[in-house]
Structures are given as C-alpha cells and as structure tokens.
C-alpha cells in the first residue's frame, strides 16, 4: 500500500494477491477472521462490530488489485485480546476479510513477530510474552487470539483493574444483600431457605469495599429498651455532590436494636432541625421518649434548650476521641463498606452514592447481627421479620410500565436501573 498525498489515495499491493483471493473464495469469512499480511501498509477491517472506538477521517481511496477503488471514511481501535490492541484500523465494508499489516505492527507498536512453517507468534518486545498466535491455513496466517478472547464469554469482567465475579446461583443473594458475609448469609438461610447458602468464593469487591486496618475495642454495654440511648453523628462532606446536591448524611443508631436511620443533608446547618424532627417522629410513631442522645462535640448537636425541654440527657465524647462515640463510628464504616460494594457492583456514576447509602441502610436493618443475638434490627424494633420477597440487587436492570395514555402499538415499558426503595412508598 502506497500513500499519494495529492488525492489521499492508498494502493494495496499484495505479494500473494492471487493466493489471497483464491483462499477466501473457498474459506468463508464472518468478519472475525484476521490475516497477517506483509504487503499492506495499513490495518483493515470489514466489520464495524470489531471497533472498540472509532472516528471519522478524511476519505481515503484504496485501490484494489483488480482495478476497483473503495473509500474508507472511518478509522478506529480494535482490541484483539486483553493485551493486543491495534490502532488506526481502516473500515472497509467491501472487504470480506480483515488484514493485519506486518509493517505497521512492527513500526507503530512494541511487538515482535516470529514466523515458522505452521504459525506466527506475536510477542511483546520487552517481556517477549506471546500475546497473539496465527496458524497457517490455506497458505495464509490466520490470527486465533481474536476469536478466543472476544467471542468466548469471560469468566470475570474488569473495572478499574479489579475483577467483578459473574452472577451465579451461589452468589446471587451475596450480591442482593450488599456483599453480605458468609456467616450472616448462612444465618439468613436457616430462617429463609430460598436464600442460597454461602459458597466460599474469592470476591474482589468484598476486599476492596471492606478492607480495614484496625477496629475499635468492643463495648459490652447495651441499652435495655428501644430509644433509651441514641447515637448520632454527621458524615461528610463528600467531594462529589449527590445527584440531588447532598454532601452529608446524619446517622442515627438505636443502641438497643441497632436500627439505623440516615438523613441526607446539603449543608451542616440542617442537622439541628432534623434532630428535632427525629425526636418528634419517635414520640408519635412509637409512643416512646428518647432518654439519652450521645454524639461528638460538633456544634450542630449542641441544643441545650431543646434537649432540656424534652428531658433528654445529651452526652458528648471527649475532644479528639471518636472511639467514645464508637457505635455510630463503626456504623459509618459498615454503611460505607456496603455502599462501596453496591457502587462497584452497579458501576453507577459517583453522584448516585446517596442512593447506595440509603439502600445499604435498608439492607443493614434487615440483616442479623451477632451483637444482638443474631436477630435483625428490624425484628427488634418492629417485632416481626423483614420481608425479602421483593428484594433485588442494587443497580440491576428494571422495567417500568409506560404512563397512560398510550396507543395500542406504543411501547409498554421503559428500561431503568434499580436504585432502592423510597421511604413511605409502598
């Protein structure tokens, strides 16, 4: 292939043109077969599906050996395997085969080609690792790496250099419950047999979402009744605002049941009114009074007149000693562990972190805890078991019925992403 700057024309000169055409008249091509060619100066593909990404280019005229001319309008990148990526590939739909230019492989990438009587190995220049293999068929070298790497379903997909295991029967509930540990899954299995038992699998997401250095020392003290002691803390600000503009969340934990509430906040100044609203909520919905609230020394929690009017004892931790407010600090760690796993699993943009946090709380309240005798916070607070019948895993594909009015042949549903359950909505 030779470049002609005046008319942007490419002429392909095959050293074995007749053999090439003869081979492909008897050797059918489905657009995935790649031939290593020493006569072409550019990579060429005949299938648009081969591109990983592409862009429009100035029209390039390609002269074929039989005298006809075809024009390439697109050029892009093709990934033949996880390690073999070729760029500046011309798209020529008139071809019935794909070409790998030897000269371009050697000059534009750090590859080495080793030919023998029956095969050609493509190696990395530095490590000499084989990343592609072509077998001799009908006098031509056909690349085999492409078919194996692209068309065989991979065992795992990779996001940001870590692997995401595929959904199977054994790990479906592990995903649905926010990457719950094996012990707690087995505990749930005893009460809910339809939840599959834990299978010891290496889950990358669990390590990345839950890895920690040291844990706080456990406390043996526990309130005797719901709302005798409430822990509160403010988390944030997060550098990425949520899709609705939130940067903080207020965490509220009942010491007896470990039931947790969170309130999403846009500013720290909103804490004061939400603490007062929560006290009113408990009095109205549970007909109980909060006796003690424990928090750190943040000024948002210093409401002496309000607490005094309600007869609530406000306890604060010592300065620079978050361990004294350890129940809610550990709860933050638990929430973020689950929320990170949900975000990694769903691959949603970061601005949806608020939905992941809310769904994490929903799951945590329904999961048995050894701290409360392997009961669930939901059960201890509401005195009946949670309902798992409609539980789906966060970020899964969902379909919503289209709004009325609609005509007979209009679409009946639209695709969406499951983001959790709205409080107060059936």
Image (cartoon, rainbow, N blue to C red):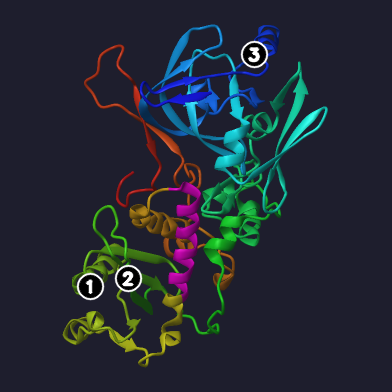
Q: Secondary structure at mark 2?
A: loop
Residue at x-position 24% and y-position 18%:
406
Residue at x-position 25% and y-position 54%:
244
Q: Are marks 2 and 3 in contact (CB under 8 Å)?
A: no
**Most extreme residue toward the right, as rendered?**
117
Q: Which residues are magenta?
A: 330-347
Q: Is residue 41 visible?
A: yes
Mark 2 or mark 3, earlier in chain: 3
Mark 2 or mark 1, earlier in chain: 2
Q: Which residue is mark 1?
A: 268
* Most common SS among magenta residues: helix
Instruction: Say the numbered circle drawn on residue 236.
Output: 2
Q: Secondary structure at mark 3?
A: helix
Q: CA distance from mark 3 to mark 1?
A: 74 Å
Q: Nearer the viewer, residue 265 or 117?
A: 117
Instruction: Say the numbered circle drawn on residue 17.
Output: 3
* Residue 334 in magenta stretch: yes
Q: CA distance from mark 2 to mark 1?
A: 9 Å
Mark 3 or mark 1, earlier in chain: 3
Q: Are marks 3 and 1 in contact (CB under 8 Å)?
A: no
Image location (x, y in percent) of residue 156: 62, 44
Q: Are marks 2 and 1 in contact (CB under 8 Å)?
A: yes
Name the quadrant containing residue 359. Answer: bottom left
Q: Nearer the viewer, residue 294 or 245?
A: 245
């Amino acid at each position: 292939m030779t470049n002609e700057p005046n008319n942007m024309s490419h002429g392909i000169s095959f050293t074995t043109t007749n053999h090439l055409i003869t081979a492909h008249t008897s050797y059918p091509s489905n657009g995935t077969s790649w031939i290593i060619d020493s006569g072409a100066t550019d990579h060429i593909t005949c299938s648009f599906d081969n591109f990983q990404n592409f862009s429009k280019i100035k029209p390039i005229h390609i002269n074929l050996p039989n005298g006809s001319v075809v024009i390439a309008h697109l050029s892009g990148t093709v990934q033949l395997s996880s390690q073999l990526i070729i760029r500046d590939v011309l798209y020529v739909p008139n071809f019935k085969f794909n070409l790998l230019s030897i000269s371009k492989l050697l000059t534009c990438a750090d590859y080495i080609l080793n030919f023998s009587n029956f095969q050609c190995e493509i190696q990395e220049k530095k490590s000499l690792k084989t990343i592609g293999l072509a077998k001799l068929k009908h006098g031509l070298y056909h690349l085999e790496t492409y078919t194996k790497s692209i068309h065989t379903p991979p065992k795992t997909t990779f996001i940001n250099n870590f692997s995401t295991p595929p959904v199977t029967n054994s790990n479906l509930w592990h995903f649905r419950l926010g990457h719950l540990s094996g012990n707690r899954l087995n505990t749930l299995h005893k009460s809910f047999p339809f939840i599959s038992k834990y299978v010891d699998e290496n889950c990358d997401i669990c390590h990345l979402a839950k890895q920690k250095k040291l844990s706080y020392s456990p406390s043996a003290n526990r309130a005797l009744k719901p709302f005798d002691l409430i822990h509160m803390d403010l988390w944030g600000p997060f550098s990425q605002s949520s899709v609705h503009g939130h940067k903080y969340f207020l965490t509220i934990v009942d010491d007896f049941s470990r039931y947790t509430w969170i309130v999403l906040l846009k500013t720290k100044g909103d804490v004061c009114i939400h603490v007062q609203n929560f006290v009113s909520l408990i009095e109205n919905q549970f007909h109980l009074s909060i006796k003690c609230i424990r928090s750190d020394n943040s000024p948002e929690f210093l409401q002496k007149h309000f607490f005094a009017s309600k007869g609530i004892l406000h306890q604060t931790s010592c300065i620079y000693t978050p361990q004294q407010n350890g129940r809610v600090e550990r709860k933050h760690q638990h929430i973020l562990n689950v929320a990170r796993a949900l975000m990694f699993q769903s691959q949603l943009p970061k601005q949806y972190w608020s939905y992941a946090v809310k769904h994490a709380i929903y799951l945590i309240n329904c999961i048995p805890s050894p701290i409360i005798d392997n009961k669930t916070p939901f059960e201890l607070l509401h005195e009946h078991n949670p309902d798992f019948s409609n539980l789906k895993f966060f970020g899964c594909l969902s379909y919503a019925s289209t709004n009325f009015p609609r005509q007979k042949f209009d679409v009946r549903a639209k695709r969406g992403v499951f983001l959790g359950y709205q409080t107060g909505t059936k």
